[in-house]
Amino acid sequence: MKYILMRHANDNVLDDLFYQIRDLACKNGVVLDKESILERMASLTIDSRDAYVHNEVKEIVRQREERHKEFQREHPGVQIRLLPNVLAETAKRINQRIEGQPLTIAYNDTLRTEFTARAIARVTGGNLISGKLLEANQVSHWMRNNKDYEGLSVIVTHEPAICGLLGFSEIKYCGAYFISRVENGIIKEFQEV
C-alpha cells in the first residue's frame, strides 16, 4: 500500500456548522445522526451549488447570501475576496494520484478528521475507516499493519502526528504528503501533494 498523510481541515467553524445543521433539521422536525450531519457538512464544502440536495445545506447557503448582500448594502465599495477552497483543491490533487487504485481513507475519530475524510471521499470515492490515529506512533503502526495491501491510503490526522513522522515543525491545514519510500517503518522520502 502507498500512503498520503494529510492534516485535517481548519476546525475554527466546524463545531458551529455541525450544530447549525443539526438545529436547522430539528426546526423541520428531522433528527439527524452524526453521519448525516457530517455528510451535509462535506456537501456544503465540496459540492457545487447546483448539486446541493439537503434542505439544511440550501438554507445555510441562502443565509450566507443574505448576510453577504446586507454587508454590501452597509459597506458599498468594500470588496470581499473569497479565499480558495483548500480542502477541495487538496481532494482534487489526491484524486489525480489514485490512478485507478483501490482507495482507503483512514481518519482519527474526531469531528475535524472525520469531516475532512468525508469531504475527500466526496471527490475521490474510497472506503472510510475510523481508527486511533492521533499520534505519530499510532499512524506508523497503522502503516506497518497495512503495508501488504494493494492501493492507496489517505491517513487524515493531526499536525503533531505528521510533524513527528516527517520532521516538520508545522503543517498547514489540509496539507497532504505522498510517502514515496518507507524503510523499516521509517519514512525516507515524501513529497507534497
Image (spheres, rainbow, N blue to C red):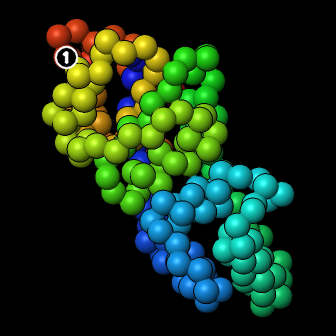
Secondary element under disc 1, as helix, strand or loop, is loop
Counting from the top left corner in percent of width and height, residue 139 is at 24, 33
The residue shown at (77%, 77%) is: 62
Query: Taking 19 as reference, is 137 above or below it?
Result: above
Rendered image quadrant of residue 140: top left
Q: Residues within 10 Å of mark 1 (few under 14, many from 20)?
A: few
Counting from the top left corner in percent of width and height, residue 81 is at 71, 62
The residue shown at (65%, 86%) is: 28
Is 84 left or right of 154, judged from the image as shown?
Answer: right
Counting from the top left corner in percent of width and height, residue 129 is at 38, 40
Is 120 left or right of 175, judged from the image as shown?
Answer: right
Counting from the top left corner in percent of width and height, residue 190 is at 38, 19
Is 68 left or right of 147, judged from the image as shown?
Answer: right
Q: Which residue is mark 1?
A: 185
Query: Taking 77 as reference, is 84 above or below it?
Result: above
The residue shown at (59%, 35%) is: 125
Rendered image quadrant of residue 169: top left
Q: Nearer the viewer, residue 114 or 83?
A: 114
Q: Which image quadrant: the N terminus?
A: top left
**Residue 6 appears in view:** no
Rendered image quadrant of residue 176: top left
The residue shown at (37%, 15%) is: 149
**Residue 142 appears in view:** yes
Q: Amino acid at mark 1?
A: Gly
